[in-house]
Image (cartoon, rainbow, N blue to C red):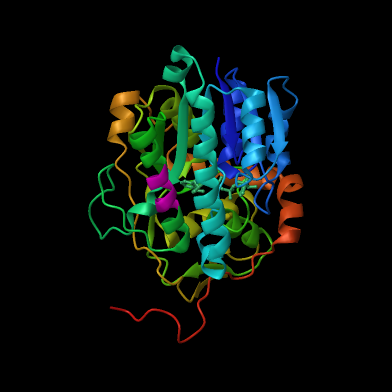
């Protein structure tokens, strides 16, 4: 069994990964600063295990990172900690530059110092998985898919900071030989998702009978992946992925945003009926600046080399997700009290880029 440091393990994807790794029998150290997006309640099912440990610290704090690595002696580091919300990166890019770039640099340097003093067998077996997003590739037109060789072309401060961190990770492999693998995944959804992102925000606003804001005309397309399928993919990539390579992760489940929102409305009409349809709550609002039109992933490498398949398609995954939010108000209610869905990510009028 592996000894694994997971950074960002109290966040949405990190917590799914920690739960999966503990269930699989591994030893896990969850290293997380607990920003607004982190919540230890998301890993409560794993926290009772004697194989689980938690350190509250910042990935930009080189001494804390070094001490955690020296103490835990990992066979793998899976690096997920990041600022992750595009709209917040428009309001305040600084935190994204700091955490996603300086934080990743700090993790890579600490991992390199540790890896260099390991014995030969341990050095060969060690892996650093850098977890990233398909948003680094920019926007697709109506056709085509992102592959591992698609050139980087990020649009938002978030995706630009992730693109930069991917380049750092690759450079540490090429220059220093650190066995780094990079994964780039499409949009995730599922349980324990902070209610600022489209799917949980829509579910909770609909339950409250509030407006369901849809950016622009809702035509933007995302390729949705159930978070537990992503967690299994990450485990596989960290265990068997080739150092220096990128693996794209996606479930071949493209949906327009408006169709995602309508699907949630229809599920709630069935599971939690109200007077009239939940679709009546949909409101089209000013689009996000720099909003990429379409993302879609070609996951052939992951499927053929490592044998991964998504277990959920969008219809099964979204029903599970809606049911989870209906059953788990204990988790989301306190978060909703802290952030109740106000609009983020607007550029002041006159400063927005003109249409080409
Ligand atoms: P999240 O915002 O839900 O969680 C981020 C976690 O990182 C939180 O627990 C937070 O406390 C922690 N964190 C933030 N800054 C930190 C710091 N300086 N030091 C230590 N911990 C810190 O994010 P997520 O949606 O779970 O995404 C996890 C990773 O996966 C990110 O790297 C993101 O770029 C990537 N990703 C996300 C998606 C998606 O759809 N959410 C898709 C592809 C890739």
Quarter holding the C terminus is bottom left
Quadrant in the rendering for residue 180: top left
Residue at coordinates 45% horizontally, 27% vertically from top-left?
Answer: 238
> How many numbered dots are placed on residues in this image?
0
The x and y percentages for residue 48 are 75, 25
Residue at image location 33% in from the left, 58% down from the top = 138
Residue nearer the viewer, 102 or 283? 102
Against 177, residue 268 (above or below) is: below
Quadrant in which the N terminus appears: top right
Q: Position of residue 63 (x, y in %)?
A: 65, 39
Q: Residue furthest left?
A: 143
Q: Residue furthest bottom?
A: 350
Q: Is residue 79 visible?
A: no
Secondary structure predominantly adopted by residues drawn in magenta:
helix
| Residue 337 in view here | yes
**Picture coordinates of residue 28 (x, y %)?**
63, 26
| Residue in the foreground of this view, choosing between 266 and 256 | 256
Specify the segment rendered in magenta: 162-168
- 18 or 303: which is nearer to us? 18
Front one among 346 and 281: 346
For this view, does 137 lie left or right of residue 315? left
Above or below, 118 relative to 83:
above
Q: Residue at x 32, y 58 (%)?
A: 153
Say which quarter of the image contains residue 205. bottom right
Residue 41 belongs to the span the image colors magenta: no
């Amino acid at each position: 069994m592996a000894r694994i440091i997971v950074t960002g393990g109290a966040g949405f994807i990190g917590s799914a990964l920690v739960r999966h790794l503990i269930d699989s029998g591994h030893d896990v150290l969850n290293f997380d600063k607990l920003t607004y997006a982190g919540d230890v309640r998301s890993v409560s099912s794993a926290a009772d295990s004697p194989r689980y440990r938690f350190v509250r610290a910042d990935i930009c704090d080189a001494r804390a990172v070094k001490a955690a690595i020296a103490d835990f002696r990992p066979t793998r580091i899976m690096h997920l900690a990041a600022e992750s919300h595009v709209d917040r990166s428009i309001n305040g890019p600084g935190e994204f530059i700091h955490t996603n770039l300086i934080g990743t640099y700090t993790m890579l340097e600490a991992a390199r110092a540790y890896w260099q003093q390991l014995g030969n067998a341990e050095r060969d077996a060690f892996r650093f998985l850098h977890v990233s997003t398909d948003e680094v590739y920019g926007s697709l037109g109506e056709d085509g898919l992102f592959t591992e060789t698609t050139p980087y072309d990020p649009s938002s401060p978030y995706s630009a900071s992730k693109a930069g961190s991917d380049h750092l990770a690759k450079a540490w492999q090429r220059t220093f030989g650190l066995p780094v693998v990079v994964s780039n995944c499409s949009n995730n959804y599922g349980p324990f998702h902070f209610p600022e992102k489209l799917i949980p925000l829509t579910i909770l606003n609909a339950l409250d009978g509030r407006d369901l804001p849809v950016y622009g005309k809702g035509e933007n397309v995302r390729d949705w992946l159930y978070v537990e399928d992503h967690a299994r993919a990450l485990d596989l990539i960290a265990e068997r992925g080739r150092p220096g390579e990128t693996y794209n992760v996606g479930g071949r489940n493209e949906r327009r945003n408006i169709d995602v929102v309508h699907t949630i409305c229809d599920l709630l009409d069935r599971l939690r009926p109200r007077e009239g349809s939940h679709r009546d709550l949909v409101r089209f609002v000013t689009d996000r600046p720099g909003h990429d039109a379409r993302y879609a992933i070609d996951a052939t490498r992951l499927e053929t080399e490592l044998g991964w398949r998504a277990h959920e398609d969008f219809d099964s995954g979204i029903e599970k997700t809606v049911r989870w939010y209906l059953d788990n108000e204990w988790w989301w209610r306190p978060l909703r009290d802290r952030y109740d869905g106000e609009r983020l990510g607007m550029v002041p009028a006159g400063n927005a880029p003109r249409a080409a």
